[in-house]
Image: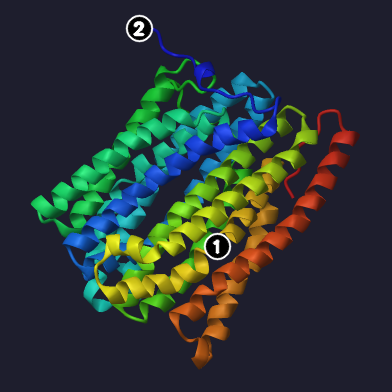
Amino acid sequence: MAHKPSKQYEMDLTSGSIFPTLLKFTFPLMFSGILQLLFNAADIVVVGRYAGDNSLAAVGSNASLITLLVNLFIGLSVGSNILASRQYGAQDREGIQQTVHTSILLSLVSGILLAVVGFFGASTFVHWMQSPPQVIDLAALYLRIYFLGMPATMLYNFGSALLRAVGDTRRPLFYLFIAGVINVVLNLYFVIVADMDVAGVALATVISQCVSAFLVLRCMIRDMGCIHLDLHKLRFHGVRVRQILQTGLPAGFQGILFALSNVVIQSSLNSFGEIVVAGNSAAANLEAFVYNSMNAVYQANMSITSANLGAGRIDRIRPILVRAQALVLVIGVTMGVTFTYFGPQLLGIYSENPAVIAAGMDRMVINCLLFALCGIMDVMVGSIRGIGYSVMPMLVSLIGACGLRLVWIHTVFKIPAYHTPTGIYWSYPLSWAATFLAHLVCFIFAMRHLRRSMQSDAEPMVPQP
């Protein structure tokens, strides 16, 4: 049976009507993000309903820490995506092949490193998080098992990033559906039948991650298009490593900065006890569905913008941004209002405890209602990264988002009237709004610089300020 070339799944990102291309790229990616969230959602729902609030808090209290540890390497996958998208727009097949083999090897090395750090550092990490004493042992156990699956997680993330670079968002969606079903079934079996508690949900997640990684690698090996993977050709191409790191490291550090500020916030919330931690965990998990839906627009905007830069179509970059902002606003407002309105019922899926539901609503009426601010901030970052600037949004995020949150925790939160979970939650929308405005100014500057560069050089180097 002949292998299918990727042309059957690729999209033309550099010509034609922009909005239909944006929708065609975004929606499979959005559904992929939602399915990926089912990994963690299934963990939290099953453990909350069948193992109790302490187990729910143990799983939920790890979310910010896991994000902190993996964000640097997820940033590298962003670097791979941007580089491959630019090469795809420029029709540089040899360049894409070098990027593919460099990226997959980099993902494997990254995953092994994360597995070692996460497994042996689990106990230390949960103590740093100031988790409630009654959940520390369960949280550390969950973390150890979860991080054993990091090589598979990294392989999937890098592989799907490369597929997205050529406009293929359908196959990752199909693979995640298969892995998500496996994750839910194994969760129910390990927790209800085998009575494995948090160890069961962690093991189910690891197995499902291995399945999704296998399917993506198999897809790339069998594909005869420009993202074909030949395991015998895996090696680090020096120039590609440098290009991936130029964009990926700042993106990763930006993710770490956001995660670090969230870890500080999570640590402050942990001081209010297991009910607040459990409610916050459930609400954050629900909000993640809204965030991932908006994040799909960010990723689509970044990939399409980068491909157009590679093709020299800078006249399309601003229209791409405008349409992406309109789309993310519609998604963010619609989903944010809907999730908040049905918040009590949705939180009831995670826990039947009225106190936990009330604690979760304290977060949702602030964060979820205003989540569109986060979406427009991220889409602006996608455009800036897509045209080759990665250090700039990292620095802006350091000052505008992370800095504001940390200052808030150490000033406003210290005031007795605001020393509440609600007092913490307001730091999110305020930092989103301020950072969006700063990114908007940076985008205007970057576009002017890019136009001058292209006018003065027939083959301009993409700036890396």
Q: Which residue is mark 1?
A: 257
Q: Secondary structure at mark 2?
A: loop
Q: Specify the quadrant of the image occupied by residue 441.
A: bottom right
Residue placed furthest toward the right: 456
For the rendered model, the colour scheme is rainbow
The image position of residue 149, as x and y in percent, is 31, 46
Q: Which residue is mark 2?
A: 1
The image position of residue 199, as x and y in percent, is 19, 56
Q: Secondary structure at mark 1?
A: helix
Mark 2–mark 1 CB contact (< 8 Å): no
Dot 2, crowdedness within 10 Å: few (<14), some or many (≥20)?
Answer: few
Q: Amino acid at mark 2?
A: Met
Q: In the displayed structure, would residue 11 be above or below residue 354?
A: above
- Give the numbered dot on residue 152: none
Q: Is residue 198 left or right of residue 281?
A: left
Q: Specify the quadrant of the image occupied by residue 403.
A: bottom right
Q: Is residue 363 left or right of residue 349?
A: right
Q: In the displayed structure, would residue 213 be above or below residue 372?
A: above
Q: Amino acid at mark 1?
A: Leu
Q: Residue at x 13, y 56 (%)?
A: 196
Examine the rendering and report whether any part of residue 23 can be seen: yes
